[in-house]
């Protein structure tokens, strides 16, 4: 009987909800199940990357902006690679590829820790950020993002998923 009451209440709430209210119950930035949202093309996107003080923390803030007039999707997290080094930053939490909707003319943010200080770092002169692994991305110089000489310190780099605000992205990075 309890199950039937819960189902009846859920159905009643669904019928009285405002149009589109239930579609918003998906994870922020995730497309509604029935919505077809196109993938962002590289030309739709602009990026920023900047090291955050104190520079010794080796944390950068990455943003992607959908410059188009319509929403589109990027991968759930940025692809970040470092010039002269193999591999890419891994995601925290560990996450599979998937779409994230970026509304027209809006930004999404990810935090990036380039060096966890658990071993001697290597130094990269550049880093490249892409919103989809299939995109070539945009390359930034160490000096251009505010990294000190001799370059971007890199050891076991991690990146967060995209978030709606800078604070959410930094909080997701943790300690």
Image (spheres, helix red, strand yellow):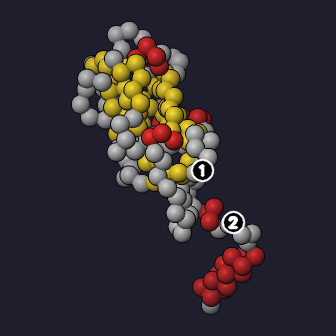
Q: SS at mark 1?
A: loop
Residue 61, position in %: x, y? 51, 29
The image quarter containing residue 126 is top left
Q: Tell me what residue is drawn at x 62 percent, y 46 percent.
A: 69
The answer to whether 156 is drawn above or below residue 10 in the figure is above
Residue 104 lies left or right of residue 128; in this view the side is: right
Q: Tell me what residue is drawn at x 44 percent, y 40 percent.
A: 42
Q: Tell me what residue is drawn at x 38 percent, y 9 percent.
A: 149
Residue 167, position in %: x, y? 60, 35
Q: Which residue is mark 2?
A: 21
Furthest-bottom residue in this view: 1
Q: Which residue is mark 1?
A: 70
Between disc 2 and disc 1, whose residue precedes? 2
Quadrant position of the N terminus in the picture: bottom right
The answer to whether 137 is drawn above or below residue 132 in the figure is above
Residue 60, position in %: x, y? 47, 26
Q: SS at mark 2?
A: loop
Furthest-top residue in this view: 149
Work out whether residue 62 can be spotted. yes
Residue nearest the viewer, comparing 101 with 8? 101
Work out whether residue 89 can be spotted. no
* Residue at mark 2 to residue at mark 1: CA–CA distance: 20 Å
Q: Tell me what residue is drawn at x 49 percent, y 51 percent.
A: 73
Residue 68, position in %: x, y? 58, 44
């Amino acid at each position: 009987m309890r199950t039937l009451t819960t189902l009846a209440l859920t159905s009643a709430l669904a019928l009285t909800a405002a149009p589109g209210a239930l579609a918003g119950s998906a994870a922020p930035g995730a497309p509604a199940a029935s919505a077809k949202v196109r993938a962002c093309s590289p030309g739709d996107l602009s990026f920023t990357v900047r090291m955050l003080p104190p520079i010794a923390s080796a944390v950068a803030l990455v943003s992607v902006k959908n410059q188009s007039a319509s929403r589109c999707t990027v991968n759930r997290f940025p692809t970040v690679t470092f010039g002269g080094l193999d591999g890419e930053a891994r995601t925290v939490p560990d996450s599979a590829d998937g779409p994230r909707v970026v509304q027209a003319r809006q930004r999404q943010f990810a935090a990036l820790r380039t060096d966890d200080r658990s071993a001697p770092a290597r130094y990269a002169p550049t880093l490249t950020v892409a919103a989809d692994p299939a995109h070539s991305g945009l390359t930034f110089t160490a000096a251009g993002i505010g990294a000190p000489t001799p370059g971007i310190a890199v050891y076991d780099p991690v990146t967060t998923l995209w978030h709606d605000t800078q604070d959410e992205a930094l909080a997701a990075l943790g300690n």
